[in-house]
Amino acid sequence: MTQNPRILLVEDEEIIAIIIRDLLVAEGFLVTVCANGCIAWETLQHDQTGYDLVLLDRGLPGMNGMELLRLIKGDRVLAAIPVIMQTARSDKKSIQEGLSQGAYYYLTKPIQPEILIAVINAALQQRRELQEMSETVNRAGRPLTLVQSAVFRFRDLDEAKMLSHCLAQSCPEPERVIQGLQELMVNAVEHGNLGVSYAEKGELMLAGIWLEEIQRRLTLPEFSPRFVTVHFQRLPDKLVFTIQDQGAGFDWQDYLDFSPERVFDLHGRGIAMARLMSFDRLEYQGNGNTVSAVVNGMSSLYGFDN
């Protein structure tokens, strides 16, 4: 990723495009504007590795935003680019369709500048982390292919990321599993052991102090002794990762699928994305402080073979 991230803005309304472009340029982003989906697709095909994020209007003339989103997510090289969709439509069906096709986030018009910038920065940060994960996995060996079972413990976010990198190497395609593992492990720390509520995380992210609060809570006497346990098991036909925190649990049922009620929040889609993209099966147990993630084989790794 370049030092100044490059954003492809796909917007057919000229005034809106100018306003958003000027806002993004003022934040240090390099912005290319396309007035329709066909031009945007040609631009992406011409420079497949040049853009760090696509900001896409759903209601485009000709090739609409959903059609362009499907093309992007269906392209092996472009699929990793986060796509944030803008829309005047806030009905549940439209929102779920976009998220299920791989959109990172939905913004409704008129755009709120502070929300737009926060979402873009979060998407870019996630992409940086994913690129670092892939590089780590590609450089590393695969010693876990020899392990039949193991138990791990960790406390903080850095250890969660390190362990997710390691455990992903046991899978047929580690780059597909690593994001889901990290999501589950990070949740176990922040929401499980440290008791950060859903609403609190949104407020902390918007204020830009989420990581600072996590570090503060890790030092508190009521939280500092807690750890997360990960059980790894290799069976003849699958790999099983069981992650257990020491928190009070949560109402996990609402997070297994994309929820239109939470679609405009800054977070809350990670479990559904992990279930859809990273694992063949994802099951929470009891009060929600234990989750089991299963990876079968190469053909069903993406969750398409059910």
Image: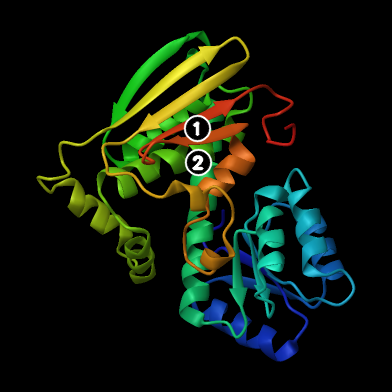
> Callout 2: helix, strand or loop?
helix
Residue located at (51% from left, 31% from top):
293
Quadrant of the rendered image containing residue 291: top left
Please tell me which residue lies in front, 281 or 150.
281
Badge 1 density bin: few <14, some 14–19, many ≥20, Cα 10 Å: some
Q: Mark 1 to mark 2: distance in Å? A: 6 Å
Residue in view at x 32 percent, y 58 percent = 197
Q: Is residue 102 visible?
A: no
At 60% from the left and 59% from the top, the residue drawn is: 104
The residue carrying pointer 2 sits among few (fewer than 14), some (14 to 19) or many (20 or more) residues within 10 Å by Cα, namely few
The one nearer the camera, 47 or 7, is 7
- The numbered disc on residue 132 is 2
Mark 1 vs 2: CB contact within 8 A: yes
The kind of residue tagged 1 is Thr
Total labels drawn:
2
Please state which of residues 211 and 273 is positioned toward the viewer in this rendering.
273
Residue that sits furthest to the front in the current view:
286
Q: Position of residue 126 (x, y in %)?
A: 50, 52
Task: Please give left or right for residue 162 compared with residue 172 in the image.
Answer: left
Q: Secondary structure at mark 1?
A: helix
The residue pinned by badge 1 equals 136
Query: In the rendered image, which quarter contains the C terminus?
Result: top right
Q: Position of residue 106 (x, y in %)?
A: 61, 68
Query: Residue visible at 48% across and 13% down?
Result: 143
Q: Is residue 54 visible?
A: yes
Which of the 4 image quarters holds residue 97?
bottom right
Q: How is the image coloured?
A: rainbow
